[in-house]
């Protein structure tokens, strides 16, 4: 075999000074995407990755086909009804992209194809369609398209009767839009071209040039982003402004699109709220007045400011109130208690209220898409780590349920009874109990030789619930255990669980993960020679911190699109999404936040020590975590690490944060990750 040369990045020292502290960044030059030397370095890393994984290529291919074979190719969504039409998305065999269609009044009616993603994607390496919004008279659909993978969509409008796509074209948007009742006026949010923050709401009149669109609202605070939607009651268009800690809404009657916006309730730092409309009231989900786990308030349409809010459902210390869905006769509450989802149905007249019965120890249940206001059917989804996802229609009056669809696992050999799911609680170093959801094949023996993949995210209050994955079976059937650690920084155990893993408590996320790993080892589930860790994006930051803190616990680590250069990125407000993150990570322009951030920033904390085998991934066009963060991190690791373990860096030169856009193309990336793990276990 030809000797493979390890890539060595050139060093150009850049002094970065803040608060009297000087950091020297030898790889700062990699920020310039247009620099041919940057591209050459990334290509050298890809060549190195390809050379070192050449022996797994055939296995990757067989893994890909194995995972693909479990997925029904000619699949379709469960139809949902809105404004007299049934809407469906479906896939055809051998095709990568969805087809969006509808049927008028009944499901027996002729199918009207609105968009064929396969035809639209032709000629593009990346393709995404989003934000399909049908006009109130059902004749037109606005839609957004991204062909670069930086989540900058252009919006166009299609006549659904004639198939004509109008000349109207609006660039650099979030992709979503909202029709006013006149079927002529379209509201949408535009992005700052550099930071990609959605900062402006415009109003477009059908048939006019987009350059003449009227600016309706501009969010000038660069820690906020803005968006627009229509209430389920269809009466109001709502413009929202949110930061990590604070929200504000303005409203406009949908039948009066040229009227002035009305402030719902002005922003107050630290007060979050969201609104739903029913009859002549708004229902406000908020953390106001110390309601950490949120409460529900009610207020009349005419005087909506916070001083007029009246308590409807009080705050509860042990129950996180996550959402409310409103129907004509019922409202439905989404709650979380001890990590588990609860769905409560209540009649508006107070004559009945009850929880849907779920009796598993670890599962995920959530309200699905319910755009129809005047119905007694609630659609929800249910899944667990051993149970394929089901879409269920539940009659809120009769309490009868109908499983409309259960995810099919093809291949003929899947039996949920062959798998075991449990929830265990690890004790963190400060005494807090950290839950882990675990799944494995019933024939897998749990001992020090058992390979475990431990996964977590742990940021933004985002909860990764236990869910079924047919793709994951390729690991479980080869003897792997999958452990999902519900660490602080997520919201699994309520809002305080999030508050305890952000800002100046961020390190709790990292130590929770490490202590969960130590628990798995001490309880005899595995050993350091067979324990693997994985996380992506902010979970990639987690991986970066963990390998600096406790590299000896892991045989291999996968860091996908990792956010690892925390200090430099958070000091650069030209980088997309930075300013909106201050309330999550802290503002390093303040010394206390700077010092704390630097103390865990993976790039800044790389040191001369042995690291585990590592696979790092990124996309050149990533708008969430710029490619140069993992590129710099890998270069620095190569320079100072003291081990001979693998350090592989795989760069998708065509994609962004979400990876490949095709339905099955994304499986090839999973096959690479699984091959990395299984190769280290000698299972190829």
Image (cartoon, helix red, strand yellow):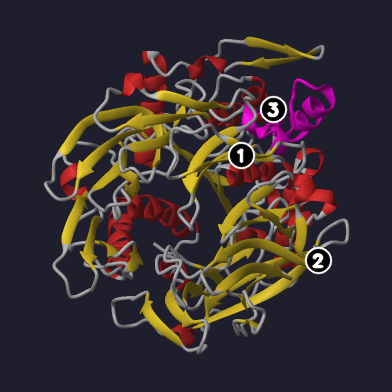
Sequence-earlier tag: 3 or 1: 3
Name the residue carrying label 2. 316
Q: Position of residue 24 (x, y in %)?
A: 68, 15
Q: Secondary structure at mark 2?
A: loop
Is 606 within the magenta?
A: yes
- Alpha-carbon neighbours of circle 3 within 10 Å: few (<14), some, or many (≥20)? many
Asked if 352 appears above or below 2 in the picture, the reply is below
Q: Quadrant where the N terminus lies? A: top left
Sequence-earlier tag: 2 or 3: 2
Q: Secondary structure at mark 3?
A: helix
Q: Quadrant where the C terminus lies? A: bottom left
Name the residue carrying label 1. 643
* Residue that extends furthest to the right in the rendered view of this protein: 430
Q: Position of residue 651 (x, y in %)?
A: 40, 35
Question: From which residue to which does the magenta span run?
Answer: 579-608
Name the residue carrying label 3. 604
Q: Position of residue 279 (x, y in %)?
A: 56, 61
Residue at image position (62%, 59%) is 529
Residue at image position (58%, 78%) is 421
Say left or right for 436 vs 680: right
């Amino acid at each position: 075999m030809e000797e493979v040369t390890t890539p060595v990045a050139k060093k150009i020292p850049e002094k970065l000074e803040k608060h009297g502290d000087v950091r020297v960044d030898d790889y700062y030059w990699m920020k310039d995407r247009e620099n041919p030397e940057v591209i050459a370095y990334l290509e050298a890393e890809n060549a190195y990755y390809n050379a070192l994984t050449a022996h797994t290529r055939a296995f990757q291919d067989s893994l890909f086909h194995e995972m693909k074979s479990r997925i029904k190719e000619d699949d379709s969504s469960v139809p949902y009804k809105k404004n007299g039409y049934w809407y469906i998305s479906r896939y055809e065999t051998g095709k990568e992209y969805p087809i969006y269609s509808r049927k008028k009044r009944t499901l027996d009616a002729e199918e009207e194809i609105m968009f064929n993603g396969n035809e639209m994607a032709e000629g593009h390496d990346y393709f995404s369609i989003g934000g399909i919004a049908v006009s109130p008279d059902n004749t037109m659909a606005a839609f957004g398209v991204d062909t670069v993978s930086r989540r900058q969509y252009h919006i166009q409008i299609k006549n659904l009767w004639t198939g004509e796509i109008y000349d109207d074209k609006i660039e650099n948007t979030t992709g979503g839009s909202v029709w006013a009742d006149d079927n002529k006026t379209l509201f949408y949010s535009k992005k700052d071209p550099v930071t990609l923050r959605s900062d402006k709401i415009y109003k477009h009149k059908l048939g006019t040039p987009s350059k003449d669109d009227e600016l309706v609202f501009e969010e000038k605070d660069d820690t906020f982003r803005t968006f627009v939607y229509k209430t389920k009651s269809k009466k109001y268009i709502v413009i929202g402004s949110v930061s990590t800690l604070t929200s504000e809404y303005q409203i406009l009657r949908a039948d009066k699109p040229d009227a002035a916006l009305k402030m719902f309730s002005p922003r107050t730092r630290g007060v979050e709220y969201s609104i739903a409309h029913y009859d002549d009231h708004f229902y406000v989900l908020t953390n106001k007045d110390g309601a950490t786990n949120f409460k529900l308030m009610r207020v009349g349409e005419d005087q909506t400011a916070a001083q007029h809010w009246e308590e409807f459902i009080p705050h509860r210390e042990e129950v996180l109130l996550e959402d409310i869905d409103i129907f004509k006769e019922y409202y439905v509450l989404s709650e979380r208690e001890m990590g588990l989802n609860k769905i409560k149905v209540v009649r508006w007249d107070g004559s009945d209220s009850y929880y849907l019965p779920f009796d598993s120890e670890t599962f995920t249940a959530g309200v699905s898409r319910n755009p129809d206001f005047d119905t007694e059917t609630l659609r929800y989804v249910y899944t667990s780590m051993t149970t394929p996802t089901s879409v269920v229609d539940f009659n809120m009056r009769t309490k009868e349920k109908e499983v409309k669809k259960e995810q099919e696992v093809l291949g003929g050999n899947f039996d949920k009874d062959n798998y075991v799911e449990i929830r265990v609680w690890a004790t963190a170093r400060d005494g807090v109990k950290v839950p882990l959801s675990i799944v494995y094949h019933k024939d897998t023996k749990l001992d020090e030789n058992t390979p475990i993949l431990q996964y977590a995210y742990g940021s933004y209050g985002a909860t990764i619930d236990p869910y079924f994955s047919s793709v994951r079976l390729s690991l479980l059937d080869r003897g792997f255990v999958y452990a999902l650690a519900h660490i602080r920084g997520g919201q699994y155990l309520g809002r305080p669980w999030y508050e305890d893993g952000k800002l100046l408590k961020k390190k709790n996320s990292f130590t929770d993960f490490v202590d969960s790993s130590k628990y798995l080892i001490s309880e005899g589930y595995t050993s350091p020679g067979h324990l693997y860790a994985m996380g992506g994006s902010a979970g990639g930051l987690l991986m970066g911190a963990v390998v600096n803190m406790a590299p000896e616990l892991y045989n291999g680590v996968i860091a996908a699109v990792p956010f690892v250069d925390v200090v430099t990125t958070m000091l650069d407000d030209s980088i997309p999404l930075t300013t909106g993150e201050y309330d999550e990570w802290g503002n390093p322009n303040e010394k206390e936040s700077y010092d704390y951030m630097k103390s865990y920033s993976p790039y800044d904390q790389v040191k001369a020590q042995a690291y585990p085998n590592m696979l790092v991934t990124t996309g050149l066009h990533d708008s969430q975590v710029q490619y140069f963060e993992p590129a710099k991190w890998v270069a620095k690791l190569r320079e100072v690490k003291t081990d001979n373990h693998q350090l592989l860096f795989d760069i998708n030169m065509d994609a962004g944060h979400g990876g490949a856009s095709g339905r099955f193309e994304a499986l090839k990336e999973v096959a690479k990750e699984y091959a990395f793990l299984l190769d280290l276990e000698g299972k190829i």
